[in-house]
Image (spheres, grey):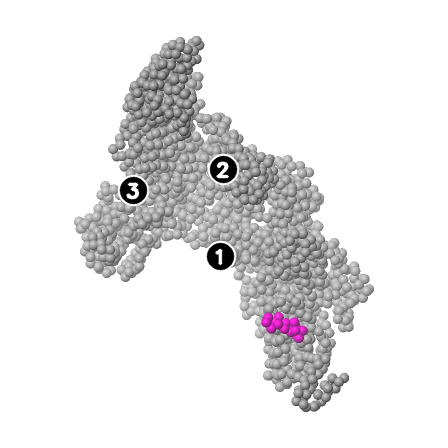
Amino acid sequence: MVDFARDQSDRRQTGKKTWLNVTDITTEFLWKSYCDLKQMVYHGVTCQILMLQLFHGLLPQLVSKANIQESSSEWFSHLCSLVDQSHNADTDSSKDEKDRTVIQMASQLILDGASLFFPDKEARRKQLFSMMDNVNVSEEKPSVSLIFQSLCQFYSNVEPSGLLNLPFTLNKEFDFQPTLAVLETFLTVAAKEFAIAIKSGGDIPEQSQHLIKLLCSLQISLFSWIEQQFDSQSGDADQKELIQEMLLKYVKMVVKKSNDSIQILLDNVKDELPTAKFAIMMSSNKLLEVVLDKTYLSSSVRQMVLLLSHLVHKLSNNYRLSLLNYLMTLTQSMRDLSPHLPDQFFKLDSNYWMSVASDDVVLRTWDIESPHSYENNQQATQVFSCPGATSFVVDFDNKCETEKRYDYLLFTDSRGNKMQFDQKVGTDKWPKNVTFRGSHRLTFLFHSDGSNVEWGYKFKVTAKGFADVQLSALFDLHLAACKLLGKLSAAVLDRQHLMPNEMDFNAVDKDKMAIDLKSDLWSTLLKGGHMESHMLKKSKLNQFLLEMISGDSQLGQQLLKSCADHYVGSNLKKPDLDITILTVFSAFVWHCEPLRESVIQFVESNGSSELDDGIHSAYSYAESMRLYIVDQRQKQKIADEKDNNVNNANDIGEVVKEKAEFLLQISALEKSYFKNKPSRRSSKNIVSVKSSTQHKKTPADTERQFSASGISEKFPEFKFVTEFIKESKWTKSSVIKVLDDRRKQARNTTEVYEFCIKFVDMSTDDSSIFEVIIVLFLQELLGQQSCQCQHYLDWLEGCGIQLENNLRQAYCGIIKRLLEGIQHLQDSRNLNKSVKTAQEMIQATFIHLLGVNWQSFDLDFLLEANIPNLLIQTAKGSVAMRSEILSDITEVEELKEYDQYMTWLNEHKNDVSFSDWYNQIKSTSKFKEKEKAVQMFIAKFCDLLEVDIWCDGCGKSLPGRRYRCLQCTDMDLCATCYAGGVMPQCHLDDHHLIYLMYKCDECNAFITGRRVHCCICDDFDLCFGCFKKEHFPPGHLDSHSTKIFPLMKFQNTQKSDSSLQSYIHQHVWLLFASFTLQMAGTMPSVPTEHTEDNFVAKAGKLHQQCIDQLMFCLQDIPSVDQDVLEETEKSFAKQKEEEFSLHSQERIMGLLGAMIPKENTCSSLSGSIHSFSSEKFLTRLFDIARGETGHESNTQHLAMGLVAKLLHLSSVPTQVVDNAVCQSANIQSPVSCQPQLDGEITINFLFLFGAMCLERSGIDWASSMVSILQDLSSSAIWSPVIEKYISKQINHLGQNDNLTSVFTLFVVSGFPEVMSIGKQVRYSYENSEPRHGVVLNHFPDKYQTFLLDAKSRRRRTVRDEYIDCIMTEVSILNEEHVTKFTSVIKDTVAKIQQGSSITVEETWILSLCLKALHKFLNKAEACDISDEIFGFVQQLSYLAGLGTEFSKQWMLKDLEVLSLMLYTQDKENVEKKFKSPSTKQEELLGHDPKQGLDNAAKICLQTLHDDLNIPLSVVRVMYDMNNKDTSELLATVRDNLADNSNFIPSEEIKKMAKKWEKPLVAAAEVIADKGMDFGIQMVIMPDTTKRLTTYDWEALPEEEDVNMSQKLIKMPDNDVVHELLLQQRAKSSKLLRKELDSQGKSGSRDYLNKVNLAISVLWARHVLMALLSDWPRERFEITHTILGCKESGVIPCILDLLNRTECQDMFTKAVKNVIRSCYHTDLQSMVSTSCYFMEENHFSTVIIDSEHPYSDNANNSDTIQIEGAAYLSIKFDDRCVTEEGCDELVISSSSDLQQDRHAFSGPTKRLWKSFDIPGDTLYYKFTSDCSSTDWGYRFTVIAGKVGRFDTGYLILNELLSADVDMVYRNIDMCKLWSCLVYVACKQISRQRLKTLQLLLRVMHTQSRNLQRKDSSSLDIDLSLLKPLWQLYRNLSKDSADFSSVAPPIVRALTELFMVAENLADEYCIVTEYLAKLQSEEEIRHTAFQGIVNVAAVSASIGLTNQAYNAVIGLMKK
């Protein structure tokens, strides 16, 4: 039965079915049974125990009965007696165990049977309270204690609300005093017990502990009820007020009791003579047990604090403030107690915190396992959460396996970082264990699809973090109370309720009538706030206005009469509106300060003073309101009639009057806040505020607008008053409500900030604010605010000026208090870790409070607090300090790494793209092991690989120096993130970092090991690998002394688990930058009305402080080159300052640049610009720019950029700049020098400095200096000085040429376009409008530039063709300068002609003079050019005709860059290992056929080779055999060509030519020499006499591809031109890079001379082109003598040379001028040469075609060679496609397929792009695998040659377009016709089409000639067209399909023969013409067919004739 009863109770609680029905069992039955059974002799005690157990098991059922019998009292008395008897009896061991069990059961029944033994509620309450009075009395009977415990337990667990009598539903009649009285009783007893225990030194009685437990239960019941009432009474304010009042009184009561108890404890602790028991308790540490576990302070009070924190967001602000004050006393009491109990209240520097600070503690584990195998279509999720965890470690079982890609495990941490695993554990994709850091939450997802399954997963998740801190109860209570104070303060500061709810704007109709809380009226018109009545009465002006409205003031009537007399508007008489208009007028006066002063003066003078004109304007403006009111009344009347609303009481006049009267109650501002007031909405200007109510303009509106024109601009207050009155949403009640709310909030906010100050003061100890309670308070204060305002007065406008001032003082007060505490702690190096964390937290709070948008009225505080210095010092103090460690890498290990890196570099250099190489490396099986080495290789050679490196901290691009981690796989940091201590993911404090600063001058890689520095070479360093391998660049010798520096590693010296330090450093710098820019931008925008407060001066002072701080940081930059840093001699603070300055150089310079004002704002800044224009500031910038202060190169660049920006400002005096230059460069004082112009010293310095940049080979520097001086030349201040200097330098050219002269010419002519870092460019992006940007990095091989958009600050990668450098041209050249240029050019060319030696500087100056002259000619008109310029054309032609001896693939700008980068002045006599191009060729090829020849001989040999296809080796042998005479050589060649169409050398010549022959396979750069530029190519005119009598020419057939086009003349479209341009840029850039690699950092003087001479030759061609294109025909004729030619036939050769330039339009103009300006006698020679140009041999094309589709396992390779070609062009068919990644076509210029390698694979059309290969030979190979195949490939190889066909065509085309008379008088048309027909027969494709066009022009001239002369003979022989006729007939047969368009050649020939037939008809020679076109066979066939036709006709008509007879005779035979 006992077991069943116990089971019965358990089942009833769980809702399960019970086994027994005990409804009939009563206590009486049990009592009788108990009495009977215990009388048994042998088993009475056992039965007694069982009955008691049964009674206990049935207690729940017995209590639930409606009537409880009297037997319950019998049971209760008996049980008490059993307990009491046991207490009185002996408790020795003789007592039976069963007896003790009886007593235990009796005690348990008393404890659990309170509801049974005390069934009446009231009796139960009385019993409890009666026993509470004697709770501390030592009772003799133990049953009494059990009864008290039973009652406490009953009310705690069963019915806690029974004692409180709290209603379920609150009503107005509820009285909470009885409830509080009950709670007070319990608190009083608990406090009394606490006092007794403390005073007596004894233990707290057990009854007290039961009482405390009951008190806690009652508290929970109370707070739960309060929260329930808050939620249910959401709309009843009175009931909410009642609830909060009740809660407040209870908290006050608890706090008071707690303070009293703490005071008792404090008194006993502080008592010098404590009681003996208390002393014993203290000495035995028993006090810890008493206070911590058994008092109400540690339980009920602490519980109340925690429960109260959940109700904070439901309370009103006034109750929150009251709670703050009450709880403040509690924290104050515990703060007073804490020093006396150090073992209970731990300070931050206590060792206790260090013992619990480890984060390696396992907090919790989870074991997760799936079914094996798992099922399909699973989506299992689980969340692992553990508060306090800092990491999760996941350990996977070795058996884990899922289906690849389709079934996976996905882990996501709280930051959103995801990791996915599939396949099998232990692989790269699924490691055995994974760690997730920085998160307290981890989410797991397992997904499987509907297909295959595997074993599944099994893993263990371990949460690790900080261990729970064991604190004493009082300390824990103290901390909880402080957190509650912070939470309450944050809730009061929250202004969310004042902000508009954006989500509910259009939710309901009533919201549409809500006023605009974002309107600027709050910060202007309503800013003063609503005044109380007593304040209004104190204002005499306000009372005067009210009396004037009511008519009680005589002065008021006088004022109104004066205004009415001046009023000139329409007078609309409405007596009922007079008062309204007067009220509006009064509102205008009241809110306009000038009008107020005028009226006050009028009143004080008793009406004798004159009124201001503004008064009359205000009256007029108010009168205009009459029309508005009448209009609105009319509209309202119409609306009322429509709605049948006849009783509308809202008259518009009354509404206007009410609003105007209300405005008189708004406090008027003492100063104007209307002008230049920044709007809350930046896109809206406050002066243009418009009403949100939109309505159509009425005539009244127009009249009002006209009448008020100009008034609102002078008095903007009128517009605000008018807006407030007219806007229907602005009602008086709504505005008053908002103003009241804001006033209350302002007052509450002020109290909270003042409370914060008090709390910090109360909580500090020894002036240190770094306490736990302060940290927790501030954390809650900032973290619990739902919205963060941008300013402490946001959404509080209108609270009143006084409240604003109070709030400002309070806000600034808390900042000052925190500042004092922070400044008290100077050195944080040796701080305890906990104190350091607290310091960082408080610093972060302090920075957060400073991060507001400071206004002009805050400047006093900012000056007082010295904010600039404070922010910058905080930034310095938060710098991450690191120690230097010597690297322990051995030489063997370093050399092994070097070998591996060079192997990878060579693999990439073999024309393999980086992405292909990286993917190939990544696909290897051992990539994981060497991934870190691969990433380090990429980091070292990033510039060569052209890989962009990004900072892992901030994400910005790192083009140069950076810090790299040696432990992380791939982690780089910029200097800013390094200084800030940024810790990217997986990077730890103990990792070592290295500074990638130096680059090896040989391999061009960053040095990551030992650095070898040469003590002799200038700025020369080698990596250890290159040094050991003896890989030295040119200029460095083995004999040079070197010094080896070990690698320095950096490691954190201050390890911290907090990321606050990095946050502080970055945030405080952003605040400083923002504050600095705000001060720089505030000065010109401050209203003029504030000048009396000197706001501009204050802002200027702060601005100056910011600049001083920045310049101070730049003053103390430690040298990064020093070998040993003596840091031990420096203070820790000094080390931090230097570290900050070192790594903040660039951002400091950038901030200074952003602070410099624009030119148009300098005038408004007045004296504030003095900060930048001071001599000290400029001197410092010049020092930095000159590199004399140890700053980095980028910083020097930025400093010079700042100088340039300042020089552009007109407010910077030139004299001050001169003084700064003198002081920086130690130049003689300008006073003694007495320069003619101010600024001359500065300009001299800038030009000299630019020349120094050239000397250093600093192309970026030189480019920047040129740009700076060019920009300054456009300035009105500096232009005269620059012009004077440039003129002086130009005039001295040729006398003492030096680098200064060279640099000056660069400024004049322009610097080559160099995409250097910081270069300003103009670019187009995605077909958008041109934008401005700044270059961040340039990738020459990719033709891409990484830049920053100047406007949006977005970073973009743009192709080079869409970018133009922004350059300012210097337009100061005049005739005198040009004359000097021509003189220098003549003299230098004369030296070249004479063979005299010239220096590098002379050739450089020659090229720059030509460049400047070309620039002048492009801008000048032909009539403005002097005759002297045209007089040196002969010298110019000579120079242009010279060869550059460089590849024609070089672009001019790349040659200029090559010259700049190789130039070094001071190495003229230094021996160098220089390999000239010829030497290099000899090494590769043996002897060069042109070796040892002069320029003329080289040109002759090359011309014979190009035009006649004679091998160079053969030509060289023949040249030697003809006594090395070019004339004899030409004659020999001519004789051999007379008998043979092709030149065939003899066997003897072939044998002799072998020594000059080149091998079949050569390097690509040597093969490209076939395209070398050797200048003018002379021609050997063939014998054409045979062509005039030969009629058996044969026209070459057209190629198949030509017929595919539908264009008449196939011209390259934009895509082709674009592609060719890209190829040209690519080849030129590649040549530049190879040349720089071969020459090293500087070239020999001879080689530089060659480069400069080549540049001069190219510029000479441009100048000659410019002269010829603008040739003044009326002043000069063009002859071969002027052009420096021996005969006129050479003129086309010169034109052909000019045709190779990039200006085709200008070339066309030049040809036209030459034709029209030359001697007519020279035309025939020019025609002959041009025809020869057009006869240039045509190279055949080769088509390579695969099978379609191709077969598997294909391996096709072949060689294609077209002799004589300079390059080969490869064009792909549009259908080309192969299997991507598997089947590949490779084309190269070398047999090993490595040189000029191009690989193609895949289906994308854009991948199969056309390209060119240098030389006349290509190799290709196609391979396919055994899988799928596709269409295949097809490409056409076209031989390319820098041909002269186009030149000849342009000359002849222009000639035939000229005057007909001139053509016929001077040109042999017959010979021309013969040559052109011959060309048409021998050329094909595009060339043939152009030739046919010329033939048509010739025939048109013949047609015109027939009309103007008497002779009827034709000058041309049409019969020569016979070969073309045959071609036409053949092509016509092939294109007989009339449904398609004929090919272009067929259409062209059709037109040709139609015109020819018409021409023959005009000259009456059609029969002869047609006959000559036919062959004899064709004539016989035609005649025979005619005879047969005649015979047939004769036979049909029966007529016999000769034809009939002949046919019959033929048939018989």
Figure quadrant of residue 770: top left
| Nearer the observer, 1639 or 234 | 234
Local SS, label 1: loop
Q: Earlier in the sequence, mark 3 or mark 1?
A: 3
Query: What is the distance, in whole Å, between disc 3 and disc 1 at their CAs?
Result: 58 Å
Q: Earlier in the sequence, mark 1 or mark 2?
A: 2
| Nearer the observer, 1634 or 1100 | 1634
Residue 1987: tell me if it is visible.
yes
Instruction: Return the residue at label 3.
Output: 740
How packed mark 1 is, by other alpha carbons closer than 10 Å (few <14, some 14-19, many 20 or more), is some
Query: What is the distance, in whole Å, between disc 3 and disc 2 at their CAs?
Result: 51 Å
Q: Is residue 1370 above or below residue 464?
A: below
Give the amino acid type for the residue marked by disc 2 in the picture: Gln
Look at 61% across and 45% down and name the residue there: 938
Give the amino acid type for the residue marked by disc 1 in the picture: Ser
Q: Position of residue 1573 (x, y in %)?
A: 67, 62
Instruction: Return the residue at label 1.
Output: 1275
Local SS, label 2: strand
Q: Quadrant of the C terminus?
A: bottom right
Q: Nearer the viewer, mark 3 or mark 1?
A: 3
Figure quadrant of residue 1285: bottom right
Instruction: Return the residue at label 2.
Output: 382
1553 on left or right of 776: right
How packed mark 2 is, by other alpha carbons closer than 10 Å (few <14, some 14-19, many 20 or more), is few
The span shown in magenta is 1928-1943
Query: What is the distance, in whole Å, between disc 1 and disc 2 at their CAs?
Result: 70 Å
